[in-house]
Image (spheres, rainbow, N blue to C red):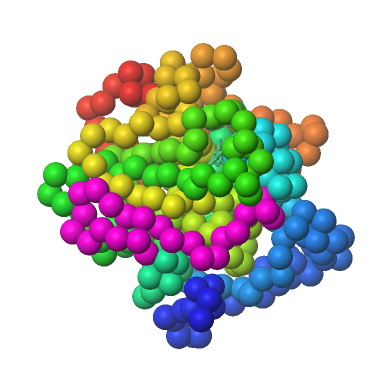
């Protein structure tokens, strides 16, 4: 049974799809179906999921915004490159290696990873370090659920993540744009935080390839580049792991990269952001500390100088 049809939920637990269906009908009426075909979104089965109290009440961006304006350098550096090229990526089978300081290391497939997991809809604000933002209705589950199952060892302090390297299917990887594979990392307490999810879908469907199919990280209080896509390796370690943008330019991108309107990027202000889809004349909006998730996460950084640990 393909993982995307799997569910451990009773139908009574499951969110009615009428809201999304209405949205889709509207989208289709406005040429959305043609759009989906044009950017190569496959016809997909809908996922079963429950709603989450962690979701924002803000209006999500359209499926078109979320799937046509992307950063995924493995497919090129243009915002439309992922939508144009990601269809080339083979996502089945998808083995994920989990190693390092864990009681149960191994290579897990998507059925293993999703077995017994309750998928949730998490509508999160998403703030890119480039000062644009969206609201995205992810489908996923807490990273903590997976980490607990593989049993972090007593010395584990960090979690490192890697995206696959497959230049045959990822044209951006035929050039040394970044030091492949794309790498990211979290402190273990950040990784175990209930807001941190592994997302396997959005808008009720499995993850579009340009958004990081079949499984990606989402850490809503950090700049978007921490939310690594198409993960093939998760390593528990006692050392702060090397991370792609920090290796590329340590002065501009720190390990923590918490959204912080008071710490500017050396080349631009982080005080405000442009909400994608807001229209040509929409005004910029203020960026919130920890992207508005301070109540939940500020305690993780108590006593730390966030100007130094940017
Ligand atoms: N993951 C990989 N493997 N490669 C990338 O280039 N870009 C990051 C992040 N994850 C990136 C990645 C950046 S800069 C952002 S802003 C988000 O993905 C964009 O996610 P989205 O395209 O789903 O909005």
**Image location of residue 249, percent across then percent down:** 47, 19
Is 281 displayed left or right of 217 in the figure?
right
Instruction: Name the quadrant containing residue 30.
Output: bottom right
* Point 51% across, 51% down: residue: 230
22 inside magenta stretch? no
Is 95 a magenta residue? yes
- Placement of the C terminus among the 4 image quadrants: top left
Q: Report if residue 65 is visible in the image.
A: no
Is residue 267 shown above or below 218? above
Query: Residue at horizontal 44%, vertical 81%?
Result: 9
Which of the four quarters of the rendered structure image does ligand 1 lie in?
A: top right
Percent across and percent down for residue 208 are 63, 57
Q: In the image, residue 183 lies at what x, y percent?
A: 43, 38
Residue sitting at x 61%, y 73%: 46
- Measuring 16% from the left and 52% from the top, which residue is drawn there? 153
Q: Is residue 40 left or right of residue 301?
A: right
Image coordinates for residue 189, horizontal then vertical, percent: 26, 45
Q: Is residue 142 above or below residue 234?
A: below
Q: Nearer the viewer, residue 287 or 74?
A: 74
Residue furthest to the front:
168
Q: Nearer the viewer, residue 215 or 219?
A: 215
The number of discs equals 0
Residue 147 appears in the picture as rendered: yes
Q: Is residue 28 left or right of residue 22?
A: right
State which region is magenta: 86-108
Between 297 and 95, which is closer to the camera in this rendering? 95
């Amino acid at each position: 049974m393909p993982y995307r049809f799997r569910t451990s939920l009773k139908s009574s637990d499951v969110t009615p799809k009428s809201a999304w269906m209405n949205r889709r009908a509207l989208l289709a009426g406005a040429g959305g179906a043609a759009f989906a075909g044009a950017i190569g979104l496959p016809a997909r089965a809908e996922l079963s999921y429950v709603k989450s109290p962690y979701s924002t009440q803000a209006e999500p961006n359209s499926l078109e915004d979320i799937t046509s304006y992307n950063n995924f350098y493995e497919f090129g550096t243009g915002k439309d490159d992922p939508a144009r090229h990601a269809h080339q990526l083979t996502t089945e089978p998808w083995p994920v290696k989990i190693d390092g300081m864990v009681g149960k290391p191994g290579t897990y497939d998507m059925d293993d990873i999703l077995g017994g997991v309750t998928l949730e809809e998490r509508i999160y604000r998403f703030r890119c370090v480039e000062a644009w933002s969206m609201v995205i209705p992810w489908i996923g589950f807490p990273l903590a659920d997976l980490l607990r199952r593989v049993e972090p060892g007593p010395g584990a302090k960090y979690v490192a993540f890697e995206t696959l390297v497959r230049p045959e299917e990822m044209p951006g990887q035929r050039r040394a744009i970044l030091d492949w594979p794309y790498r990211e990392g979290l402190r273990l307490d950040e990784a175990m935080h209930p807001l941190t999810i592994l997302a396997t879908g959005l808008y009720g469907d499995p993850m579009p390839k340009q958004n990081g199919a079949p499984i990606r990280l989402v850490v809503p209080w950090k700049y978007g580049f921490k939310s690594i896509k198409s993960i093939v390796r998760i390593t528990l370690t006692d050392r702060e792991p090397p991370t792609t943008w920090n290796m590329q330019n340590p002065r501009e991108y720190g390990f923590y990269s918490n959204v912080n309107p008071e710490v500017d990027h050396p080349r631009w202000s982080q005080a405000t952001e442009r909400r994608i889809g807001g229209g040509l004349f929409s005004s910029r909006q203020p960026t919130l500390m920890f992207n508005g998730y301070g109540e939940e996460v500020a305690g993780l950084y108590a006593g730390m100088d966030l100007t130094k640990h940017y």
